[in-house]
Amino acid sequence: MEREPTQQEISQQPVGVVSVREVLLYLSQDRYLGKKEAAAYTSLSIRNLEARLPEIPHYRVGGKILFKKSELDRWLSQFREGGTQSLDLIVNETLEALGK
């Protein structure tokens, strides 16, 4: 099993470079979900999910409907309420503070 990189090793990587491990982790997390899994992931009933199919990005393979997890996240973000700052704003301010 490969060890986790130290903070020093991470900070020495050029900005914008992504390790193979990070890519593999991303690919394992951003996967396709069936209707039942997508309903559970979004906390919607299957019936509600099916009713919203025209507005939710999805794929139809034969008779099976699939949803990409990242696309569900993006779709759900349009319904966000409350909070004082968006995540993009927080990330941009943090990067500016770090001088990147």
Image: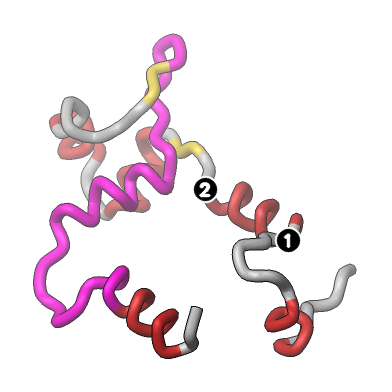
| Closer-to-camera residue (31/21) | 21
Q: Upstream in the sequence, badge 2 or badge 1?
A: 1
Q: Nearer the observer, disc 2 or disc 1? A: 1
The residue lying at 21 percent from left, 29 percent from top is 53
Q: Position of residue 5 (x, y in %)?
A: 78, 79
Give the residue number, with chain letter if any, for mark 2: 30
Q: Does residue 36 appear left or right of residue 42 in this picture? A: right
Q: Position of residue 20 (x, y in %)?
A: 75, 55
Please tell me in which quadrant of the rendered image residue 82 appears: bottom left
Where 65 sits versus 87, above or below?
above
Q: Position of residue 93 (x, y in %)?
A: 33, 82
The residue lying at 17 percent from left, 53 percent from top is 78
The kind of residue tagged 1 is: Ser
The answer to whether the residue labelled 2 contacts the one labelled 1, judged by CB atoms less than 8 Å apart, is no
Q: Does residue 8 appear left or right of residue 46 in this picture? A: right
Q: Is residue 95 magenta?
A: no
Given the current orientation, which residue lies at the most extreme top position? 62
Q: Does residue 72 appear left or right of residue 4 in this picture? A: left
Where 18 sits versus 84, above or below?
above
| Closer-to-camera residue (19/54) | 19
The residue lying at 30 percent from left, 32 percent from top is 57
Q: Magenta residues, as a range?
A: 61-89
Given the current orientation, which residue lies at the most extreme left position? 82
Q: Is residue 84 magenta?
A: yes
Q: Which quadrant holds the N terminus? A: bottom right
The kind of residue tagged 2 is: Asp
Please tell me in which quadrant of the rendered image residue 81 appears: bottom left
Give the residue number, with chain letter if any, for mark 1: 19
